[in-house]
Image (cartoon, rainbow, N blue to C red):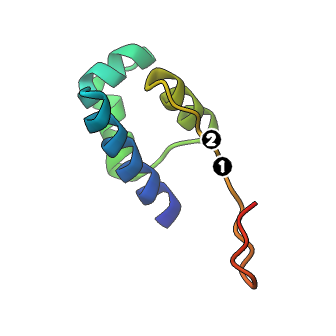
Amino acid sequence: TKRSCIMQEKIKIVLVKRGMSANQLAKILGTSSSNLYHKFKRNNFSINELKEIGEALNCDFIGQFKMRDTGEEI
């Protein structure tokens, strides 16, 4: 989905800012590099996985709703 694609890009940006590789992230998460690569490729991350990734990258994952008619983010 488009949201997942955005999350994939954001994860990669944080990895660069943290000076980490996806392989290092996979190791911290206790998964294989191959599994993480496939999640990136499929843009397939659950909310819990995003929270775990945030924790591994010393970040807070904050999900939001955006109201379609007003654009307000909640």
Q: Which mark, residue 17?
A: none
User: In which image quadrant can residue 20 be found?
Assistant: top left
Pick the front one: 42 or 53? 53
The residue at the point 72 percent across, 62 percent down is 65
Does 73 sit above or below residue 40? below
Horizontally, residue 25 falls left or right of residue 52, namely: left
The residue at the point 48 percent across, 24 percent down is 58
* Secondary structure category for the residue under label 1: loop
Horizontally, residue 61 falls left or right of residue 56, namely: right
> Is residue 48 visible to the viewer in this orientation of the structure?
yes
Instruction: Read off the residue under disc 2.
Output: 47
Badge 2: few (under 14), some or many (20 or more) residues near its Cα, within 10 Å? few
The residue at the point 34 percent across, 15 percent down is 27
The residue at the point 27 percent across, 30 percent down is 22
Q: In what quadrant of the picture does the C terminus appear? A: bottom right
Residue 42: x, y in percent? 38, 51
Pick the front one: 40 or 68? 68
> Is residue 1 visible to the viewer in this orientation of the structure?
no
Does 56 sit above or below residue 74? above
Residue 71: x, y in percent? 69, 77
- Give the residue at the far bottom of this rendering: 69
User: Is disc 2 in contact with disc 1, using a CB cutoff of under 8 Å?
Assistant: yes
Type of the residue with mark 1: Gly
User: In which image quadrant can residue 51 be found?
Assistant: top right
Gap between marks 2 and 1 measured at Cα: 8 Å
Instruction: Read off the residue under disc 1.
Output: 63
User: In which image quadrant can residue 66 be found?
Assistant: bottom right
